[in-house]
Amino acid sequence: MSALAREPYGPRGDPGRHRSLAELRSGLQALAPEPMIRGSLAGIVRRLADGSRERLTEAELCTEHGLVGDGWTRRRPRDPEAQIAVMRHAVAELIGNGQPLGLSGDNLYVDLDISADNLPPGTHLRVGEALVEVTPKPHNGCAKFHARFGDDALRFVQAATTRRLNLRGIFWRVIESGRITAGAEIIVLR
């Protein structure tokens, strides 16, 4: 049994806050476009061993450990292609519908266009003092995401018509360690 399987499930979602597919689609259309080259880090969340989430104002991104102290470090085998889970902040809030940021299990919430067209695999970004790279691993909704946000949220993030928008998020790997802070600028390096 893996270390991940022994860790608690994590926070539960509130079924009373699940949005319908129509609400999610309408909400997405109402969102302002995100910046493409210079964005910002809206939130940092560390997944703790007891399954809880810790919202941070600053943290360390490390080539060996990802977000220092996060659950990724405890998982064996560690997948370097899934070191840092990233989600667009506005989409996380749309899906969460008032639930705590971090419920989805991502590490970083960004105000930046994370679509496949804007951030294809291999793209480098400067986040605070750290340098990261977009990995090719797809970030799909899983059973936990489904349980926390419902059937329609899972269909919403996996829809073929919007898949290139990466509504569920993307993965980064750290290629140069450094400090990050909430509100830090994110610069896409072409």
Image: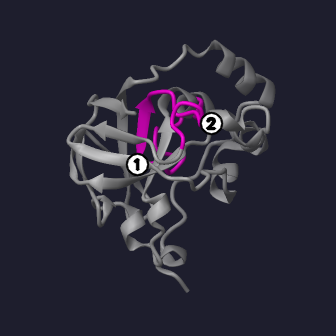
Magenta residue check for 118: yes
Q: Amino acid at mark 1?
A: Glu
Front residue of 164 and 16: 164
Question: Left or right: 159 with respect to 36?
Answer: right
Visible in this render: residue 98? no
Give the residue at mark 1.
133
Query: Where residue 146 sits in the image (x, y, percent)?
Result: 70, 50
Query: Where residue 133 sits in the image (x, y, percent)?
Result: 40, 48
Front residue of 179 and 154: 179
- Identify the residue at horizontal 55%, vertical 13% (top origin): 32
Label 1 neighbour load within 10 Å: few <14, some 14-19, many 20+: many
Visible in this render: residue 158? yes
Count of marks overlaid on the render = 2
- Identify the residue at horizontal 35%, vertical 39% (top origin): 125
* Position above or below: 2 against 177: below
* Position above or below: 112 against 136: above
Report helix, strand or loop for mark 1: strand
Look at the image and give the residue range highlighted in magenta.
96-120
Front residue of 178 and 41: 178
Residue occupying the far front of the picture: 190
Query: Where residue 82 sits in the image (x, y, percent)?
Result: 49, 59
Give the residue at mark 2.
167
Q: Amino acid at mark 2?
A: Leu
Question: Left or right: 109 with respect to 180?
Answer: right
Magenta residue check for 142: no
Report helix, strand or loop for mark 2: loop
